[in-house]
Image (cartoon, helix red, strand yellow):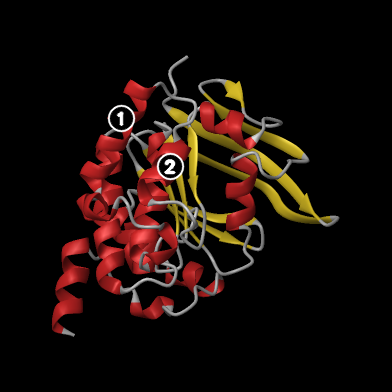
Amino acid sequence: MPRDSLIIDSLVVRRAGREVLHGVSLVLSRGEIAGLLGANGAGKSTLVMTIAGTLPADSGGVTLGGSSLLGLSPDATRRRGISVVAEGHRVLGALSVMDNLRAAGSNLTMVELRREIDGALSLFPELTERRRILAHNLSGGQKQMVAIAQALIGRPDFLLVDELSFGLAPAIVLRLGDTLRQIAERGVGVLLIEQFTTLALALSSRAHVMERGKIVFSGTPEALIRRPEILHSAYLAGEPAELIQKRETLEEIRHAGTNG
């Protein structure tokens, strides 16, 4: 069965005996970017970890191509086509950039690995000249590039990006946003978990809002902007809903940043 959709159906997850996700459902298609918005503690990272196999689910389903992913290890989930860029641009600091990329493709043949590394570096040419530098000596933005490149080495059908903009300068965030759009154009489905709502709405063709472990909105960014009370209720940090009056493009965000 083709892997055209990642389907989360009525997912219930408990952590430390407390129910954190309350019947979450959403569908992510290949080639689209979907934004997952919500305040800290809404359950966004729990959802990502459950999809990725890091946390067990109590009930519900996560399926890809008609096959369940629940109960699989993180490595097995990755082999099925799900890659995660975790919050905090995590890399193997004691290894060089190239060794970080090689480590991400340990299950590939040498020919496949070279091809995948070349493809990842074509998205991030900045890393080519830094390929021998230890990862802990990179800037935060460069580390995030390495983290995304690592995720792509696995040739995913779907990429889950948890807090793309965390701790990064606006110019770097825009650069990475452009890259996510290119990745989606290659046919990869991207779930973007993001507190920077303007960026998420600029990139996404579909938006989901989580509040207290539930999806309280699923629809187009334009439809979400017409209902600011949803964003207000979800307590999106740093960007009051009343200030989001239209769906800005990345170009408009960039222009505002250079002239503001």
- Determine whether, in the image, residue 113 is placed left or right of residue 254: right
Q: Earlier in the sequence, mark 1 or mark 2?
A: 1
Question: Residue 64: image x %, image y %?
Answer: 53, 27
Which residue is label 1 attached to?
A: 114
Residue at the far right: name it: 17
Question: Residue 2: image x %, image y %?
Answer: 43, 18
Q: In the image, is residue 11 above or below residue 146?
A: above
Q: Nearer the viewer, mark 1 or mark 2?
A: 1
Label 2: few (<14), some (14–19) or many (≥20) C-alpha neighbours in 10 Å: many
Q: Residue 151 carries which label?
A: 2
Label 1: few (<14), some (14–19) or many (≥20) C-alpha neighbours in 10 Å: some
Q: Classify residue 16 by image quadrant.
A: bottom right
The type of residue carrying mark 1 is Arg
- Determine whether, in the image, residue 124 is placed left or right of residue 142: left
Q: Which of 95 and 39 is in front in this view?
A: 95
Rendered residue at 42%/33% (across/down): 156
The type of residue carrying mark 2 is Ala
Give the quarter of the figure containing the C terminus: bottom left
Would you say residue 241 is visible in this rendering? Answer: yes
Question: Residue 218: image x %, image y %?
Answer: 47, 51
